[in-house]
Image: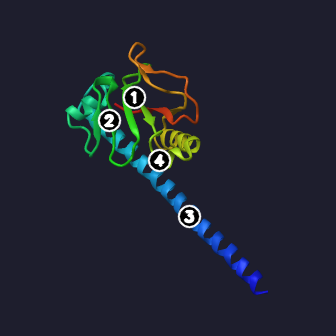
Amino acid sequence: MGQIIAVMFIIVSAFVILSSQLRTDNLLYVDELERTKEMLSLIDRSVGDYILAKEKMGHINFDLLDENKYMAANYTLSGSGFLSKIEFPHSNIIWQIIPNPNDNKISYKLLVDIRNNVILSEKISLSEKYIGEQFCEKIYFGEYIYDSTVYDAGNEDYLGGGTTSDGLFSCTLYKIK
């Protein structure tokens, strides 16, 4: 009888430990999604400031936003022109912004690379779809483009060929001039 109680105690203890670990993992995931939303919000506000200063949407890129002090945050900039990208501290999410070649007067495109973010990449398909649909489409009324991969200077747009689970996607976001 004592052995049965001991085994049950071990099973219940293991379940409690596993359950608390799952809750911690889910909290980290939700926190990282919230951080991602804040990064997107900061980028969009910077684009808004750029527009308010009567700048041309057809030239927008992170190099230009950085050079003219429109980005008000701690980030690392790499590349130049339309190939420039930023990464915020401790996020490992890479952002790249270009004018929308189909309508560079009121919209821009943002390539998001979440492949190196440890927390989001554990659920990469869910993360990509959630950020695209919940943030790009529902919060910012933009368009989620799941198959974007890299910037092509010849076409002045992001190339397709990606999937819903490769950690690369873009958002077309609209601004009112």
Kind of residue at badge 1:
Tyr
Task: Report which residue position mark 2 lands on.
Answer: 47
Q: Secondary structure at mark 3?
A: helix
Question: Which amino acid type is shown beneath numbered disc 2?
Answer: Val
Q: Amino acid at mark 4?
A: Val
SS class of the residue under badge 1? strand
- The answer to whether marks 1 and 2 mark residues whose Cβ atoms lie closer than 8 Å is yes
Q: Around disc 1, counting alpha carbons within 10 Å, would you say few (fewer than 14), some (14 to 19), or many (20 or more)? A: many
Disc 2 vs disc 4: which is toward the camera? 4
Relative to residue 123, is residue 148 depicted above or below? above
Q: Which residue is mark 3?
A: 21
Horizontal and vertical percent for residue 47? Answer: 32, 35
Q: Which residue is mark 4?
A: 118
Disc number placed over residue 108 in the picture, else none: 1
Label 2 or label 4, whichever comes before in sequence order: 2
Compare marks 3 and 2 and give the one earlier in the sequence.
3
Residue at figure coordinates x 38%, y 16% from the top left: 153
Counting residues from the start of the chain, the first of labels 3 and 1 encountered is: 3
Tag in front: 4 or 1: 4
* Residue in the picture at 61% in, 66% down: 18
Locate residue 169, reporting x and y percent: 50, 33
Q: How is the image coloured?
A: rainbow
